[in-house]
Image (cartoon, rainbow, N blue to C red):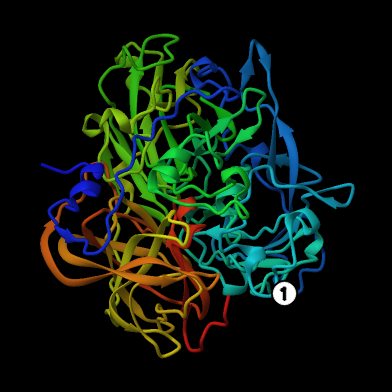
Amino acid sequence: MKKKRRDFLKTSVYVGASIALPGFAFHTRNALGVPLITGLSDPALQPKFVELAINALAPGFIFRPVDDDDDDDDNGTASKFDISTRQFSAEVGLVNNGVRLTTNLWGYGNRNQGFTWPGRTFEVTQGTPTYVTWFNGLTKNRRPLPHLLPVDTSLHWAYSLPGYDQYSIGDNGVPLVPHLHGGNTESASDGLPEAFFSPLWKVKGPQWKKNTYTYSNDQAASSLWVHDHCLGLTRLNVYAGLSSFYIIRDEIDTGKTNNPLGLPAADYELAYAIQDRMFTDTGALFFPSSPGDPFYGDFITGEGAVLPPDLFPGGGPTALAEFFGDHMVVNGKIWPKAEVEPRNYRMRMLNGCDSRFLVVRFRAVPTGATDLNSAGEPLPFWVIGSDQGLGTPTTVDTLVIGPGERFDLVFDFSQLQHLDSPRVIMENIGGDAPFNGEFGNQLLPEDLFADRQTDRIMAFDLVRPLNQSVPDAFNPASLPAYAGNTEPVDKVRKLALFEGKDEFGRLQPLLGVAEPTIDVAGNLVNGSIAWHSPTTENPEFGATEIWEIYNATPDAHPIHVHLVHFQVLGRQEYTSDLIEQPVLQHNGTFAVGFRLENIVLGNEVITPPGVMEDAPKDMVTALPGQVTRIKMTFNRNGRYVWHCHILSHEDHEMMRIMRVGPGVPPPA
């Protein structure tokens, strides 16, 4: 029988893998319940399925290129955009005593089309470059705006870097840097965490190269997304609203109703960014960071952390290990609905949450139902692709979507006619706690919020008549199968995921290596390594590598590698000794890390239930007690990163610099 994650923390036993923990004892974590706190919005009192969901692929929600006659370098074929970040107010569907509330947000946009959460969608063509000039407009009356959320300046973050500690958000503004997640992009345009820039570019990070980013779009048609990636602020800047879809089209996936594959298109192609949030009862975004806030007792006092009062007046603000919101948001609206016809719809789904793994099902409910108490059995749907484009079509009724992952679905709403049901609810059977591969009836009561509202995401109402002038020609047999990466392998790397403690005793997730390795500075290293230490992942240009990722933590981690797309080869159980060792922090202090010794491989693991990986990926879920193998080819030189896409993890050192090609990366 599979052990629960809290049992792991007590007994140090993984799923089929026993790990010795000499010299260090993990604390058991308390249940991550969120009691209703005075001053916070009560999700149970918020309306469900009232607001119409924004379709991020609706014609009015697409960014329009700027007019530019000076197209010398692209012969008039390139798209050019001027995109800024601004603070604005919007209604997200919240009410208090019948009064509609507004929320201050940050969004990508421009003067002509305005600013939205999420930002409008980039829709571009394969092989045609896109040039985006990015502006940081977080000012008012030419003075920098404060952050919307509490900032923990004890972290390794933008203004803590050598030569930058004289800057502050109050004096110099919030640093930003946009990253095209999934882009096969030159290093200078990748959105590296240290390529940040303040308002008016007055402060520029050590890896900043230019204002205008070049996206070559030289990759398969796919669903990418743009989000902020500033060092130590990613979780907060994305939470404030900084994300946008980026859709690449090609000659077969055209987005037009006459596309060669017969895919649902135009009005029948939908794009939804799913996120979780907390709000105050006045409508403001809320992110816990101080004593008395949700999760503080779990991740600070419950772990025995000691926060010096000179750095944390009153106990905060401090970064917390993970975040789970109690309001579900789709394209900037809480629990919205969509109105559909009885036909196939294509849905591009993005999990834009900080820490939450979504486990999605669709279930028919009676007219007007806002919960799942009378819901029918899960309905089947097709998964036709993932992060990096189309894959082998697979029919499922449950889909796990990790933070940062995208999936391409086709759902046939004519099923509702046969069931005599006018509504289907997109259900979430994932927990409100760190994910370990379990969901649904495998979860413990303490894995779920009390009076849980996060079990539902949005609704679809079958209220529109079938438009017979547009054919419904979807046929999964017409879609190509995924061939995988057929290149010969040049190198196999053994990498690892660890959970240690920082210098204050806070949980600190870390990346590292699972075998003795020579870094680019010539040092022999092993085990957990912090962000700023010399690079250990230095593939040659054009090399094809297999990365074996050993997860030595009690939770799953969604791993993202910049630049590349990869094939998920499979998973295998393992056992090892987990040996405590010091890990150097950004401020010169030492904290607790680990290394693996005496690794013994066990049984191969079948693809976990609800996981669809028969498609090109840039995200993979590494499950506890397993080694996960991915295969990729590195086709550009330069500096990149790989990291966990739990945003609170990457902000607290679960990220490492990767260098493709010759040369030693300069220090961060």
Q: Is residue 517 visible?
A: yes
Q: Residue at x 39, y 43 (%)?
A: 302
- The three-letter amino acid code for the residue at tag 1 is Asp
- The quadrant the C terminus occupies is bottom right
The answer to which quarter of the image holds residue 452 is: top left
Q: Residue at x 80, y 44 (%)?
A: 112
Q: Which residue is mark 1?
A: 73
Between 668 and 362, the one lying in front of the other is: 668
Q: In the rendered view, does 250 fall on the left or right side of 171? A: left
User: SS for tag 1?
Assistant: loop
The answer to which quarter of the image holds residue 98 is: top right
Between 68 and 12, the one lying in front of the other is: 12
72 w.r.t. 552: above or below: below
Q: In the rendered view, does 266 fall on the left or right side of 565? A: right
Q: Residue at x 27, y 36 (%)?
A: 439
Say few, some or many: other residues with alpha carbon within 10 Å of mark 1 (under 14 / 14 to 19 / 20 or more): few
